[in-house]
Amino acid sequence: MDIFNWLKKRDLEFNNKQLIEDAFVHASYLNENPSVVSDNERLEFIGDAVLQLWVSEKLFSLKPKLNEGEMTTFRASIVCEEALVQYGKQLELNKYLKLGQGEERTGGRNRDSIVANMVEAFLGALYIDSGYQAVSKVLSEVITFENKSQIEPAIIDYKTKLQEYIQSDDRKSLTYEVLKVTGPPNNPVFKIAAKTEDITLGVGVGTSKKRAEQNAAKDAFDKLVK
């Protein structure tokens, strides 16, 4: 099954076949295939904005009403890289990625940053091609909550939780420091420390800086709240 059968299965029509295909073209594939004219990087820009708007509207309409701080925190959790990877794999969209041979060999099809960017690009392409309702139909498959209590356990933004915890007693600042980067350039692994006043609170490892920072924040938060 290709992406167009995937769309038809969901009764989603498409007008510009090339635009939809572009959403799955990684830069590595473009570099190895001179006949391909575009990758998915520009579409990510639109997809990110559409995703933010859709999630914001859904949070705004919840009953009982959330305050601005809660909406901001929950939105950050729902649209973070980790969440996007989860959505992409639930929808099995990473099957349609077009990668260069090197990226394919080194596991790019399941790499968090590549999958997350592809999801945003696909949403951007779908919005341009078919409009907001088509995007809403896809997102409604994987983002399902009817009240505050259903959001909180799903995806936790530990960076925000740690920041709030650190600042609850005083005005200490929280920083993240890259301790080490290992692996090849196209598949790096980051080791990052969460610190305050030169004191290391926690350490995390991840395949992107954002993921490593979240893991460092989780490590710190778990230790602090014991």
Image (tube, grey):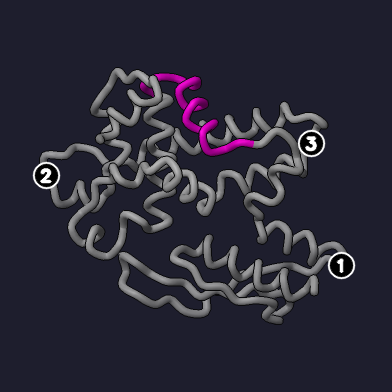
* Res 223 quadrant in image: bottom right
Residue 170: image tag: 1
Residue 153: image tag: none
- Name which residue lies at 57% across and 66% down: 213
- Tell me if residue 196 comes above or below residue 32 in the rendering: below
- Name which residue lies at 33% across and 31% down: 6
Characterize the local packing of mark 2: few (<14), some (14-19) or many (20 or more) Cα atoms within 10 angstroms: few
Residue 95 at x, y percent in the picture: 30, 45
Q: Amino acid at mark 2?
A: Pro
Q: Can you identify the residue that label 3 sits on?
A: 66
Is 153 left or right of 207, judged from the image as shown? right
- In the rendered image, residue 170 lying in the magenta stretch gets the answer no
* Res 45 quadrant in image: top left
Q: Amino acid at mark 3?
A: Leu
Precedes in sequence: disc 3 or disc 1: 3
Q: Which residues are magenta?
A: 128-144
Q: Can you identify the residue that label 2 sits on?
A: 34
Q: Amino acid at mark 1?
A: Asp
Residue 152 at x, y percent in the picture: 71, 48
Precedes in sequence: disc 2 or disc 1: 2
Characterize the local packing of mark 3: few (<14), some (14-19) or many (20 or more) Cα atoms within 10 angstroms: some
Q: State which mark lies toward you, 3 or 1.
A: 3
- Name which residue lies at 43% across and 76% down: 181
| Front residue of 116 and 4 | 4
| Front residue of 79 and 148 | 148
Task: Measure the alpha-carbon separation of dots 2 and 3.
Answer: 50 Å
Residue 154 at x, y percent in the picture: 64, 49
Task: Measure the alpha-carbon separation of dots 2 and 1.
Answer: 56 Å
For the stretch drawn in magenta, what is the main secondary structure?
helix
Is 99 left or right of 122, judged from the image as shown? left
Name the secondary structure under disc 3.
Answer: loop
